Image (spheres, helix red, strand yellow):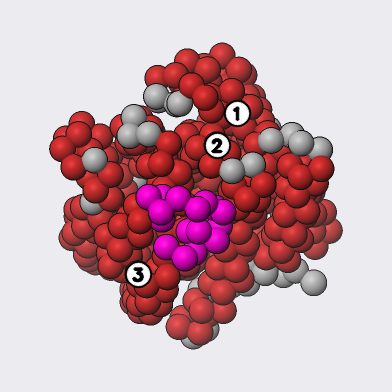
Amino acid sequence: MAKTQDLTVGDTKKLLLIFSFPTLLSNLFQQFYNLADTAIAGHIIGNNALVAIGATSSIYSLVITFSAGLTGGFGIIFAQCFGAKDYDRLRKALAHSLVINIMFSIIISVTSFLIISPVLRLMNTPAEQINDAHSYITVILTAISVPTFYNLEVTLLRSLGDSRTPLYFLIFASVLNIVLDYIFIKYMHTGVMGAALATVMAQAAAMILCFIILVKNFKIIRLEKKDFKFSARLFRKMMSAGMTMAMMNSIFSIGSIIMQYAINALGDIIIAAHLASRKLSEMFMQPLVTIGISCSTFVGQNYGAKKYNRISQSIKYSLIYSLIWSVISFAVLFFLGGSLAALITGTDSDEVIQNTKMYLRINVPFYFILGILFILRFSIQSIDRKIPPLISSSMELASKIGASFVFIPLWKYFGACIAEPLSWCLGAVYLIFEFKNTYKKIKTGTA
């Protein structure tokens, strides 16, 4: 039976590991069923499918990360309320987040109908694949309410200390996604649009199951009419937390869209290689993201409970876990990245494989720096410091703009490969100094 977990008491090292592991598996399975779209489409349809999906990957990432950031910001409020045992405020915060999510979903769905075609043309999407790319991304964006509400449910569960329930449903959704991918693409001949439909339907199944569990097992968040009474103060706080994290994610994704524009101009081979590179790197980055998110839940609950020593403990152990995973990732991707790329894409192009290997071998050695970035960015956000994460994200944006207009024209795909490690280093150095100063002020009561 699902239950809440108080992260303000107990062994931090053990609790962090126990809490992180189900979240890690959940995120890996989520990446897995996203990867299934690429793998099945690539094996059955061929490189044209890879190009169509790859050309829209940055748009997909922008919308999904904005949604995840919005709900992640709400999760900070949820965790603080739960840590402070203020359950009335928790329910009101949840009610306000539902309304905001409905508004967001409507705006994105309507806007996608109006602007997606010109955006694809502006991004240098190859003419041969633009219709498939349009079909794929239109399905994803018009059904954006599905991942948006699922993200909210998962964020709420994790804020309450339950990281296992989302895992169970994601395992089910991952299997369902693979089955639907195969049916739609292989037997119904729906092309890349079938891959998008399979993703949306699998997410919908997970969303419905999570909702049932939330209603059935978590009495402290059962909403009543009074919880929806508008509070301007709470609404501002929710929007501030949600939009800050959403904008932080969006700045990063906007940089990816700008860089995708430059990459699309390099031709089909590079588009396919970049898709393979990103799919593999995102899979191996997920543990680092998970550690950062889990740490932020710890920080949020303990900040709400005013247990500041546990904040530093969670940061320390999170960094240790990130280092361990970074070493494992290096061992796997540096030596086996090309073989894995061939496996997930079905490509027989040596150029695609070689460019994928180059991307991975440049990026993977910097994964621990990325882990530091995730941990500190999410943790600073969880102690109500909104500007530093935005500044670090802006550094990443500047790096990708530089890659798009300087590095890529000069050095082609190599220029794209070096952009992200550069931005990670800049952002991590800044956040280290910012966190040390912020934590000192919190402990001394001068914040």
Marks 1 and 3, the one that precedes in the sequence: 1
Cα separation, mark 1 vs mark 3, equals 33 Å
- Residue bearing mark 1: 132
Taking depth in this image into account, of 197 and 211 the one nearest to the observer is 197
- Left or right: 383, with 141 as reference point: left
Horizontal placement of 60 versus 199: left or right? left
Dot 3: element: helix
Give how far across and how far down residue 182 sits, in percent.
75, 49
Q: Which residue is mark 2?
A: 48
The image position of residue 251, as x and y in percent, is 35, 37
Instruction: Say whether marks 1 and 2 touch (CB < 8 Å).
Output: yes
Residue 351 is inside the magenta segment:
yes
Q: Is residue 128 visible?
A: yes
| Amino acid type of the residue that numbered disc 1 sits on in the rendered structure | Asp
* Along the viewing direction, whichever of 348 and 243 lies nearer the viewer: 348
Q: Looking at the image, which residue is at 30% across and 63% down?
A: 361
Q: Which residues are magenta?
A: 338-353
Spatial separation of the CA atoms under disc 2 and disc 3: 27 Å
Residue at coordinates 81% horizontally, 38% vertically from top-left?
188
Q: Residue at point 76% right, 36% down?
A: 189
